[in-house]
Amino acid sequence: MVVYDPEQLLVQAKQSNRVALAKLLSIVERGGSRARELAKLTWGHGGDTYVVGITGAPGAGKSTLTDGLISQVRSRSREVAIIAVDPTSPFSGGAILGDRVRMQEHATDSGVFIRSMATRGHLGGLALAVPDAVRVLSAVKFPYVFIETVGVGQVEVEVIGAADTVTVVLTPGWGDAVQVNKAGLMEVADLFIINKADRAGARETRRDIELMLEMSTFEGWIPPIIETVATEGKGMGEVFEAIESHREYLERSGMGQKRRKSRILEELTRIVRAEANRKVDQMMSDPWFSPKIAKLINGEIDPYSLASELLKVEGG
């Protein structure tokens, strides 16, 4: 297997070499020492990249909507990168062969870079791989990065935390609103989109969201609700304007800086926990651990005392 040098690839990627950029993101996904080396290279050396998260229940039309937002960015002569997140399997094809094939009309556009990401070997999974990938894209000076997730589970909620603006996409019907509320997305959403708004039930869905918003507490920014028909391009301009308005609010109010600090602390916490889990797994697989397990099974030591003993060994 050919081993690529992250530093050399980063230099090439900054010169608009998309093959080098794809290899860098593969390093991020695989994790390990080279991914950590790459993280050191990109930390603190990014550009003025704005990250937009797009999430919602499956079938809400997120990919079509993302496609419309790509067109909005390109109409302003700006470049954009898309991370299409599939938390299931890198071999399922679900991340690029399903609805996301609609975005491929931009594949020949040199100002658009689309990458599908799935859980592979990265320490801490997608919740850490995605921020690392965003930093790579930021280091090569993409003005916009869109993160699109496939659903509204816990993984998606964690992944979307890497975004500056979180956009939640729903379709007419009570089920989506309930699912989004249960997933905790009401607390992190900066913008609600009712896609396929030409269908029956759009008015009821808007009312459901408004009622949920009334029961929430906000500091300065109240998430707007925008109705779209992404397949026809309706409402896409309004969505992009709302994203830009939220960006201006974050900069004006200082909330953007507060969010970035919070994200960094959360990421550090996840890294520490993932590293601790890795060390625990390694320690418990060592041969010297077998007699300890025998003592535990025979009742010679309780699990809390053994855990404390193991932590003392690890801590030196």
Image (spheres, rainbow, N blue to C red):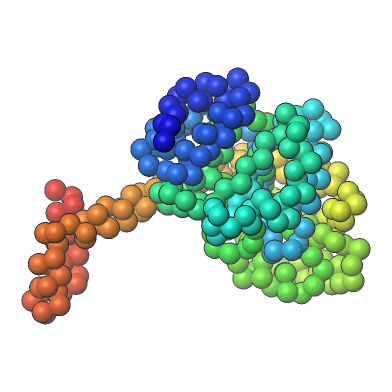
Residue 76 falls in image quadrant: top right
Q: Residue 58 appears at what percent x and percent y?
A: 70, 63
Left or right: 129 as drawn, with respect to 56:
left
> 232 or 152: nearer the eye?
232
In the rendered image of this protein, does residue 200 appear above or below residue 74? below
Extreme residue in the bottom direction? 299
Q: Quadrant of the N terminus?
A: top left
Q: Residue at point 47% right, 47% down? A: 128
- On the question of residue 69 being in view, the answer is no
Residue 213 % position (x, y): 72, 64
Q: Quadrant of residue 56?
A: bottom right
Which of the two residues, 108 or 83, is positioned nearer the viewer here? 108
Does residue 162 sit above or below 297 in this rendering? above
Asked if residue 285 shows in the view, the reply is yes
Q: Which of 199 and 218 lies nearest the eye of the viewer? A: 199
Q: Is residue 51 left or right of residue 104?
A: left
Residue at position x 86%, y 53% in the image: 231
Image coordinates of residue 10 in percent, x first then y, are 51, 25
- Residue 256 in picture, x, y percent from top left: 61, 40
Q: Residue at x 52, y 21 (%)?
A: 11
Is 227 left, or right, of 109 in this rendering?
A: right
Residue depicted at 45% across the width and 24% down the height: 7
- Asked whether, in this view, residue 86 is left or right of residue 76, the answer is left
